[in-house]
Structures are given as C-alpha cells and as structure tokens.
Amino acid sequence: MNIEVLTDPERPLGMDRPTLLILGRPSCDDCQALYAELAPWEPSLPLEILTLNLRAPEGEAFRAANPWVAHIDHVPFNVLYVGGEPVDQWTGGDLARLVSSLEALED
C-alpha cells in the first residue's frame, strides 16, 4: 500500500475514496512499525493512506485548522475520512481496527 505525505493540510479528505490519515512524528517507533505493516497490505476497497508529521509546518497548520488535534496524547493517531468527514478514529498501530472500519463501510 502506498503511503503518501499530506502536503496540503487544508485539503478535504476522503472525497474520492476513503482516506486514512495517520498523525504522528518521525521519531515515533510505533508510527514506523505501522507504516511497515501497511506497506505490503492490500485493502479490500480503494483507500488512500496519508501521513502527517505533527511537528512539521503542515502539521502545525493542520493543528490550527483542527483544534481537536490538541487533545491527542499518543501517536500514531488514525482518522478514517469518508466524504470529507471523519467516520472513525483510534490510537495506535492497529491494522485490525482499520480492516474492521473498512468492512463496516462496505456493509
């Protein structure tokens, strides 16, 4: 699975297809482990996966536009978007949770 960096923090997410946004930091070992687990994985439906470093300028801009980000205590923090709206969110590198969320979208 291709993981891309979110470079436009104001971009609406999940408009064309479900989008998983992974909020994290490069120094986060759990984030790196999640990226490694996602790399060979193939989702059951079209999915875009984006990552955002909360300490990068884009992360700061995203945080300013989304005040709820200030309440994140642990990374990776995952948000699944559909049609521009978050439909699920969870902390940690839990691929099973992502699969479950995608299966719920298919139902």
Image: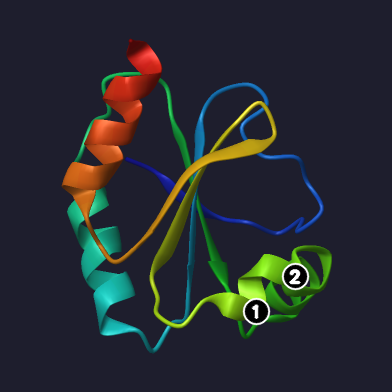
Q: CA distance from mark 2 to mark 1?
A: 6 Å
Report crowding for label 1: few under 14, some 14 to 19, many 20 or more residues within 10 A (C-alpha): few
In the rendered image, which residue does mark 1 sit on? 70
Residue 2 lies, with reference to residue 59, above or below; the image says: above
In the rendered image, which residue does mark 2 sit on? 67
Q: Secondary structure at mark 2?
A: helix
Do labels 2 and 1 touch, CB within 8 Å? yes
Give the numbered dot on residue 47: none
Quadrant location of residue 32?
bottom left
- In the image, taking residue 100 as reference, residue 22 lies left or right, namely right
Tell which residue pokes out farthest to the bottom in this image: 27
Q: Residue at x 58, y 77 (%)?
A: 71
- In the image, taking residue 92 as reference, residue 20 lies left or right, namely right
- Tell me the quadrant of the picture where the C terminus can be found: top left
Q: What amino acid is labelled 2 in the image?
A: Pro
Q: What amino acid is labelled 1 in the image?
A: Ala
